[in-house]
Image (cartoon, helix red, strand yellow):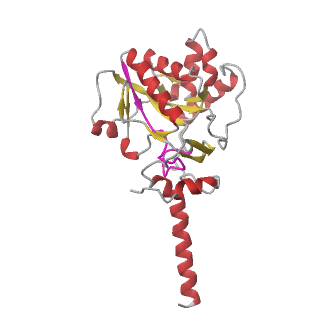
């Protein structure tokens, strides 16, 4: 083989290896067996010993199951199941969005976090407790937004006290580190709640107008888990929140062309995640 052909071969080899390194996490069909262990951070990490959340349970149902993103640390699975039971006691069924991939790691689309088995999305939209969606519906039903962004206001025709109750129960769970919601939703809660102490964990973020995003604390069994910096004390109902709301309102009034973000890279993952991904027992689709 000529030097030129050899160079081309190596370029193709390493180029394809790089692509696989970034996408291999979504190709793994099953968790790595063994005790649970979170490695790295929420946006650059992985998990061994993850559990699968059953597709349907008491008071909840998984949406978009075809993505195979319903895995997490056992503490996350227990929390979602508990929130489901609490919703069922109130006559509702929660619709559960993405948790994480079987071994965590970066997803090819949709999220930059959800990598360490400690994140879960819960739709605001709910179903009656005694009704389950068909598999087709769980793949096709869209998440309705709960805000009127250009007005900087909650969409009262869609919002329900049941959604507020589900959010509050999640925020009061001791294992929850923080929850992301759209700033307009938090502002509405700041204006309506008489006891705003539970709003401390509810943090404003872009999007999150159709679901809320739960994030757990690093579990005691995971010494390699990297926590986030703590947020300031207080309920967060302040001038900074008002700034968030105004920025969202202005962005809706003067939208910029959408630029699809690049999928997160696997280059920032801790070295130990390579073992999690490439274990000889890995089962691929």
Q: Residue at x 62, y 57 (%)?
A: 267
Q: Nearer the viewer, residue 43 or 58?
A: 58
Q: Is residue 275 left or right of residue 61?
A: right
Quadrant of the frame with the C terminus: bottom left
Q: Nearer the viewer, residue 226 or 98?
A: 226
Q: Is residue 141 left or right of residue 97?
A: left
In the image, the segment drawn in magenta is 92-113
Tell me the chief SS of the magenta region: loop
Residue 182 drawn at (x, y percent): 55, 29
Instruction: Report how many numbered discs are placed on residues in the image.
Output: 0
Q: Residue at x 52, y 57 (%)?
A: 279
Residue 262 drawn at (x, y percent): 54, 53
Q: Residue at x 56, y 51 (%)?
A: 264
Residue 35 drawn at (x, y percent): 54, 42
Q: Residue at x 54, y 50 (%)?
A: 106
Decide if residue 77 is in sight here.
yes
Q: Please tell me whether residue 48 is drawn above or below residue 119 in the rendered image.
A: below
Decide if residue 210 is in sight here.
no
């Amino acid at each position: 083989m000529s030097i030129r052909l050899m160079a081309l071969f190596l370029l193709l080899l390493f180029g394809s290896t790089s692509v696989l390194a970034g996408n291999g996490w979504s190709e793994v069909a099953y968790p790595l067996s063994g005790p649970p262990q979170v490695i790295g951070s929420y946006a650059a990490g992985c998990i061994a010993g993850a559990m699968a959340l059953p597709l349907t349970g008491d008071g909840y149902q998984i949406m978009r199951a075809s993505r195979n993103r319903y895995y997490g640390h056992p503490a996350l699975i227990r929390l979602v199941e508990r929130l489901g039971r609490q919703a069922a006691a109130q006559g509702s069924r929660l619709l559960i969005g993405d948790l994480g991939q079987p071994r965590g790691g970066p997803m090819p689309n949709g999220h930059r976090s959800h990598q360490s088995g400690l994140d879960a999305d819960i739709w605001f939209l709910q179903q009656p407790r005694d009704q389950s969606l068909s598999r087709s519906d769980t793949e096709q039903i869209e998440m309705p937004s709960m805000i009127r962004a250009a007005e900087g206001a909650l969409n009262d025709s869609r919002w329900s006290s049941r959604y507020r109750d589900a959010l509050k129960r999640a925020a009061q769970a001791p294992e929850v580190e923080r929850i992301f919601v759209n700033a307009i939703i938090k502002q509405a809660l700041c204006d309506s709640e008489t006891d705003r102490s539970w709003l401390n964990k509810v943090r404003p973020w872009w999007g999150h107008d159709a679901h809320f995003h739960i994030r757990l604390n690093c579990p005691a069994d995971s010494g390699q888990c990297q926590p986030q910096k703590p947020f300031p004390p207080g309920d967060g109902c302040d001038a900074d929140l008002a700034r968030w709301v105004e920025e969202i309102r202005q962005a809706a009034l003067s939208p910029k062309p959408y630029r699809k973000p690049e999928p997160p890279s696997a280059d920032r993952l801790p070295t130990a995640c390579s073992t999690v991904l490439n274990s000889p027992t890995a089962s691929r689709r």
